Amino acid sequence: MKVNNQPLEPEHKELTLSRRKLLAALGSAGAVALLGGYRANAMGTSVSEAVYGEDAAAPHVQGPVFLAATIAQLRSLKHSVLTNLYYITDHQQEGMFVYDPADTYSPDNTGTVLVSAAGLRFKRIIENNTVNIKWYGAKGDGEADDSAAFQAALDEAVQRGRATVLVPAGIYRMTQELYIFRHTHLKMDADAVLLRTHNDNLIRNYRASDVFYGYEGNSHITIEGGTLDSNAVQYTRVCNGMALAHAEHITLRGVTIKDTQSGHGIEMTGVRHVMIDQCRFVGFMFTSQNYSEAIQLEPAIKAGFIGQAADHTPTHHVTVQNCFFGASGTPGTVSWPCGVGAHGAYPGAYFDHIIVRDNVMEGSTYWAIRPFKWQNAVISGNHMKKVNGGIFVSTPSATSASSRDDNGVYHPVQPASSIVIEGNILDQATNSGIYVEGFPEGSGNKVVIANNVFKQMAAQFISLKCQDTIVTGNVFEGAGKNGITAADCSRIQITGNLLYNTAGHGIQVTNSSQVTIESNMITNAGQSAEGSFDGIFLTGKGGDHRVIGNTIRTETGARKLRHGLQVSESVANLTRLQNDLRCAALSGNLNDSSPNPITTPEDQV
């Protein structure tokens, strides 16, 4: 057969398909279409006329006819009939197409709609709303510009209402941002790479012209597999791997985000119900933003990216689990400064129900995790290795932009609260393991720090400026400063911890009230200078402290303490019971200068 004097079937005889082979290629959806093709020709046109034109002399044929063709050949057709089924043979674009006489407007997108020179629309038969970017002409060879083909595949979700977009292995060079829309499942092969060769983000769920409020934006999006390579060394303008705003029900699974320039791996602005699972965030390059988060949470505020309403929509119900944050090995890049966190907020907009669990943060240059104004959050089972700092529970200050509304009015401090930090392992930090931040106007509160293992901190194991906090069951070894420091705190329990080898005091409490220090074992505190530090040191204003059942020891050959327990005279209402202070301190194992401490077990009424 010929179309416009060109062979309709290629010269290879095997491309003239049998009916059985065509049915196998069609699948279930195609079988339905085939059965429908047995009706009478609605246009009253013979197959010969449809293929060859009205003047052709060919026998009249009724029923479905199966034709093999290239995309170019189908685009050249002048006529068709409803009963014709066209099998496209172009490599990696194979599939069945049917003529749709009711459609006179759909544009040719190469993948699912082909338009002939005569304006005929041919539609690909699709099963399960699943399309392949190769259908749209994507090459994946690292050289061709695959942006338009990729975007055409993503646009299919808009046309169909929902779609799964398959991305086979390959390197797809992107020269423009990609926009992903609602009800889209982007499913990439593990060896598929989207390579950024432009100055913007790789993927956004909104265009610059979009304005969404609340969570009404493009939602119900799943992205899994593949690598988003921001190519920061070659393209040095600030970018994100992904920017997602005003959306809900987002799932990212098994995605690698690589070599991002100064921005974020994923920027999430005013989103909720997000799951990020088994992803990798590797390689970062920055000029000044040394605090940048691989996963940044923020409300919808003016500081965010364009294309969204700054209506202060909060981000909440986000889970990050089983992910890796570290270096990519690309020369000129480093590990991510921060794995998961935030650095901006808005009065009244908390980050609520954030869960960060079972991740690995390696080489973080800022804080591995920064819960900034989080509430009702859980940080558990994470392994932080060779980082600057472990976990920074952060609160906006009274004079910060995060406490100021759009009218320039400053609001009362809204601290981080109701946070559980448990079961984490921290190997080596050049700062502290955990810092709970506070200010005179408001401090972090309702924090539980339990059953963590910290080794080799250059600063404190834990530094507290907070209230209503419990530190219990932790194992600490090797602090370059004090073990646990509590300053300007109230209603704190430090119980059942093991502290070994601290350069400064084992536990120091300053200007605090109602602190209970009970059943802790402190061994080899004060190792930076002989006779200069204490196992437990209470000082400054405040009081109502309870120091009960602690054990202080210094091993043979280690530097000796000044005192096992020292309490300044400014500390009032101290209860001190059953501590074992036999540590051979140089200035005495006990030095309690507080007025009238309670040292008997009788009830105080």
Image (tube, grey):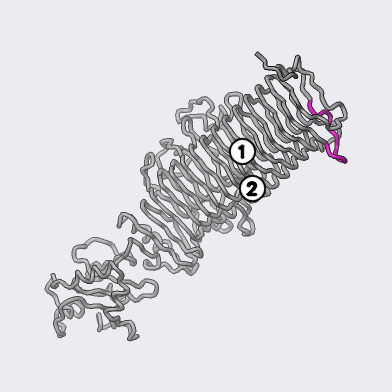
Instruction: Identify the mark at residue 442; answer none if there is no mark.
Output: none
Q: Nearer the viewer, residue 64 or 446?
A: 446
Please give left or right for residue 508 compared with residue 105 in the image: right
Q: In terms of image quadrants, where is residue 479?
A: top right
Which region of the structure is painted magenta? 554-565
Q: In terms of image quadrants, where is residue 519?
A: top right
Q: Position of residue 599 (x, y in %)?
A: 75, 19
The amino acid marked with disc number 2 is Met
Query: Disc 1 vs disc 2: Cβ atoms closer than 8 Å?
Result: no
Q: Which residue is mark 2?
A: 384
Residue 28 magenta-highlighted:
no
Q: Residues within 10 Å of mark 1 (few under 14, many from 20)?
A: many
> Which residue is outermost to the front?
602
Disc 1 vs disc 2: which is toward the camera? 2
Q: Nearer the viewer, residue 88 or 425?
A: 425
Instruction: Identify the mark at residue 392; answer none if there is no mark.
Output: 1
The amino acid marked with disc number 1 is Phe
Q: Main secondary structure of the magenta part?
A: loop
- Say whether disc 1 or disc 2 marks the residue closer to the N-terminus: 2
Please give left or right for residue 122 compared with residue 438 in the image: left
Q: Is residue 305 above or below residue 252?
A: above
Tell me the element at label 1.
strand
Q: Is residue 236 above or below residue 24?
A: above
User: Which residue is located at x 61 percent, y 49 percent?
Assistant: 361
